[in-house]
Amino acid sequence: MNRSPARSFPRVRLRRNRADDWSRRLVAEFRLGVDDLIWPVFVVEGEGQRLPVASMPGVERFSVDLLVEAAAEARGLGIPAVALFPVVPRERKTAEAAEACDPDNLVCRAVRALKREVPGIGVICDVALDPYTSHGHDGLLREGHVVNDESVAVLVRQGLTLAAAGADVLAPSDMMDGRIGAIRDGLDDAGHQGVRICAYAAKYASAFYGPFRDALDTGGLLKGDKRTYQMDPANAAEALAEVALDLEEGADSVIVKPGLPYLDIIRRVKDGFGVPTFAYHVSGEYAMLKAAVANGWLDNDRVLLETMLSFKRAGADAVLTYAAVEVARLLHR
Ligand code: PBG
């Protein structure tokens, strides 16, 4: 930064550049575009289903037929990719999460439908066992402990199942050690060199995931918490260590999650590694905004756009947000 000492008031008046809309646009340092948006979508069984999520006003869980329509609309708005999250019926959840590796499970059917009917939109799939486990954890439980290596073996099989269904990007959100390398090797051995890995590298054990667990109906099932695998909010340097490892293991891009409370982490990751870095504006952040809007306390459109821009300013290349479609519409106005 060259801050010349000669620049001082009254010759220098920074308000001059702010005086008109045209000059504000001209000097804007960061811009938000539809290319910066990833839309996370919940998928349910059945047909013609569109189920609201009470704690996430405006969010609907779609059956595959309606997901296809929604994704086509998102593609039409210029949104590059969707991230799928299946709502697995309780009777299919087991301690060992077998459903996660069934090639005909809900998310695999959704991927195949999207690839067939909505070509050109990227399909990102979460790799983690929590939608499928009866205990709500992202890995396998042995004597009350979420075990690492055994979980990784299942995550590799889940990843291969998703890749075979046609997923473009696998996004491991489980936070087991070594899973990126294991999944990369598994993909390469199976001839899926082109399938990308977007690692939830710095994922914190956050209280902001509450509404997501409502949407997936996993919250009530969860035994204990996820603090033995997700990161401690007290740590920052550790996030850089997580990112370094995931990149070494073959990640193509990384996610910092949650978003707004962790803008410092996004900045440090982007500056430290220079790799594609995505922010996850998570369910609780979305819920807070919408709750304030519902009370008439905040202006929805302006706060949404300001929030998205803050991610760009922090260094994010794209943002996963439940408001992606809404934001894209605003940007097209
Ligand atoms: C599960 C997963 C979670 C989210 C994305 N993938 C929840 C969790 O870790 O408990 C949260 C997303 C959100 O809150 O919007 N592995």
Image (tube, rainbow, N blue to C red):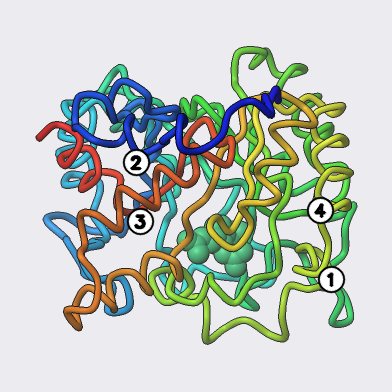
> Would you place residue 314 above or below residue 273 in this image?
below
Badge number at residue 228: 1
Based on the displayed image, in which of its 4 quarters is residue 46 positioned? bottom left
Q: Earlier in the sequence, mark 2 or mark 3?
A: 3
- Asked if labels 1 and 2 touch by Cβ distance under 8 angstroms, the answer is no
Identify the element where label 3 is drawn. Answer: strand
Q: Earlier in the sequence, mark 1 or mark 3?
A: 3
Residue under pointer 4: 176
Q: Residue at x 36, y 43 (%)?
A: 39
Q: Earlier in the sequence, mark 4 or mark 2?
A: 2
Q: Amino acid at mark 2?
A: Ala
Identify the element where label 2 is drawn. Answer: helix
Badge number at residue 42: 3
Task: Answer few, some or many: residues within 10 Å of disc 1's Cα (few below 14, many 20 plus, some between 14 and 19).
Answer: few
182 and 261: which is toward the camera: 261
Q: Is mark 1 within 8 Å of ligand 1?
A: no
Identify the element where label 4 is drawn. Answer: loop
Q: Residue furthest front?
A: 10
Q: Could you give the CA–CA distance between mark 4 and mark 1, rounded to whole angstroms?
A: 10 Å
Q: Amino acid at mark 1?
A: Thr
Mark 2, mark 1: which one is toward the viewer?
1
Q: Earlier in the sequence, mark 3 or mark 4?
A: 3
Q: Amino acid at mark 3?
A: Phe
Badge number at residue 110: 2
x and y, in percent, of residue 135 in the image: 65, 78
Q: Amino acid at mark 4?
A: Met
Q: Could you give the CA–CA distance between mark 1 and mark 3, rounded to whole angstroms?
A: 26 Å
Q: Residue at x 70, y 62 (%)?
A: 204
- Asked if labels 4 and 3 touch by Cβ distance under 8 angstroms, the answer is no
